Image (spheres, rainbow, N blue to C red):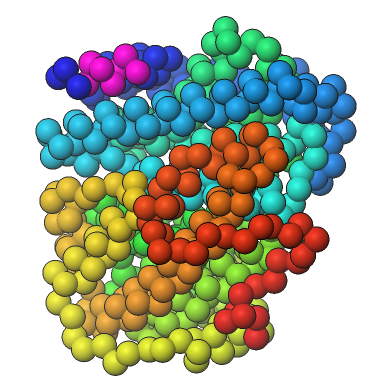
Amino acid sequence: MLNEKIELNRLGVWQKYFIKPYDQESYGILRAGARLRSDNFLKDVRDKAINIDDGFDSASYCPELDKWVESETGQTTLASLLEELQDLVKSSFELLEDRQTRTRQQLLPIGHDKWQMAKDAAEALRYLEMERPQGYKAAFVIPTAFHDLGRILEGWMMDDKNPHTNWVPHAQLSFLMLDDVLSQQKYQAIPKELKNHFLYAVLAHSYSENGQSYMSRAVQACDRMQLIGPEGVFRAWTFIPAYKLDGAIGYPKNGLYNQELPQMYQLNESMPVIEYFARCMPRNQGDSHGQWRNRIELENLALLLTYQTAVPTILDPKKVTSARGNQKIHSFDQDKIERARAYLQLVKTQDHHQISPKDMMDMIVAEVQRPAGAAAITDQIKARLLCAVMDMDSKERNALLSVFHIAKDLRLAQERDDFDVVQRAAAADSIIARTAATSALELFSKTCPDQVPAKGYAPEKDHPEPATLHL
């Protein structure tokens, strides 16, 4: 318990959230407080008492905010905020890790661990590099890097008596935690308008319709890159069986989704979720960053094509229901399918023999835990993953194995690209970019130890897709 007390002291402003584990009464109080503060904030946004309208392009239209952010005071204050958030995150995860080791409960959040936060920071720095937002808008890297703070508290409150359907929305928890940090006396110099931009971006980030400010859409554009492609595949394969009641990986055997996909939140299977995001991911701002998004979307389509050997209807036209409940018939673009198919022809595939459910589960767990900072997966969760794999027939399990090998190679390539971005940010002129890169650089250096240092960034160059995908 001594280590836990030390970590609680280091948590400072968040200490009140981590005093004790889940109990129904305390969680109810947390839920009520999160909902009240979030609803009041969003009401003020709707009533224009809080103004977050600032256009969806990279140009800034708030000279007063620009002046403060670009001042010496603004730069040092925001860098200090980044450092404190990084320290708070580090202390929080150490507390979770210590308690998970002692209790053997899955408290470290799968898919939202230190590694994922490093990925979030890398994506924010990529967006900054490619889109070059001006003035105060460049500070979007702060809410982007820390929009999932609530996942840490979600992990702390993990309990068999607190099922996934009962969780407080993590965006609301992130809002509370960031608001508590920004409310400290030492950050009183940060203009209220800028704090509101940060808080709205965090509160509005969850997968649904696009936000109503530049920062919120920048956060969403970056966050959604972790929901598709190789990173999205490994996250879905583990998160859904781990946390959803009767969560599965493969498709229902009764052909339930052959012609229609319900809303994403109604899906309890990993592969249909991956298909859903391929069909229903809202388009967002950022033309230059869109080139990177196109690459990840094409990789996602290639992975679905690989799985088509087991589920022939996976790319058929289907009725889909958006997050807002709107229905439409979705058909994949045939040209993109052909590009994804041509890419697969370049991949060195192997003839995979039958694989046991246990071996398949072990491979997934090993890959998910490989990056530095990834959550350790407990025996309880491994058992759930094993059940999910065992529920698949041999044909679908072999397709899963083929997807695994391609997704792993794509993931490694993406990590090298991310590491390059983070290294360039660490050498940038901007103190905000350099500070934002600190924690991510540490984890990427451990994950990609043999990588050649990145070359200097040439801002005048375009950002084409990799040669393997530029067909």
Tell me which corner region of the image, top left, top right, bottom left or bottom right, holds residue 138.
top right
Quarter residue 200 falls in: top right
Q: Can you give x and y, in whole percent of width and height, for residue 450 in the image?
A: 40, 64
Q: Residue at x 41, y 31 (%)?
A: 89
* Region in magenta: 4-10
Residue at (17, 62) in percent of width and height: 387
Which SS type dominates the magenta stretch?
Answer: helix
Determine the residue positioned at 64% across, 10% down.
188
From what the image shows, is residue 225 above or below residue 164? below
Residue 330 in sight here: no
- Residue 147 in picture, x, y percent from top left: 52, 37
What is the quadrant of the C terminus in the image? bottom right
The image quadrant that residue 12 belongs to is top left
Confirm whether the magenta stretch covers residue 119: no
Q: How many marks?
A: 0
Q: Nearer the viewer, residue 233 or 87?
A: 87
- Near-viewer residue (429 or 171): 429
- Above or below, 98 against 7 in this view is below
Residue 5: in sight, yes or no?
Answer: yes
Can you give x and y, in whole percent of width and height, for residue 260 in the image? Answer: 49, 69
Q: Position of residue 352 (x, y in %)?
A: 26, 88
Query: Which sits in the foreground, 204 or 7?
Result: 7
Which residue sits at x=24%, y=60%?
365
Q: Is residue 290 left or right of residue 398?
A: right
- Give the residue at the far top of this rendering: 185
Against 169, is 371 above or below?
A: below
Instruction: Specify the quadrant that holds the N terminus.
Output: top left
Q: Is 268 positioned to the left or the right of 344 in the image? A: left
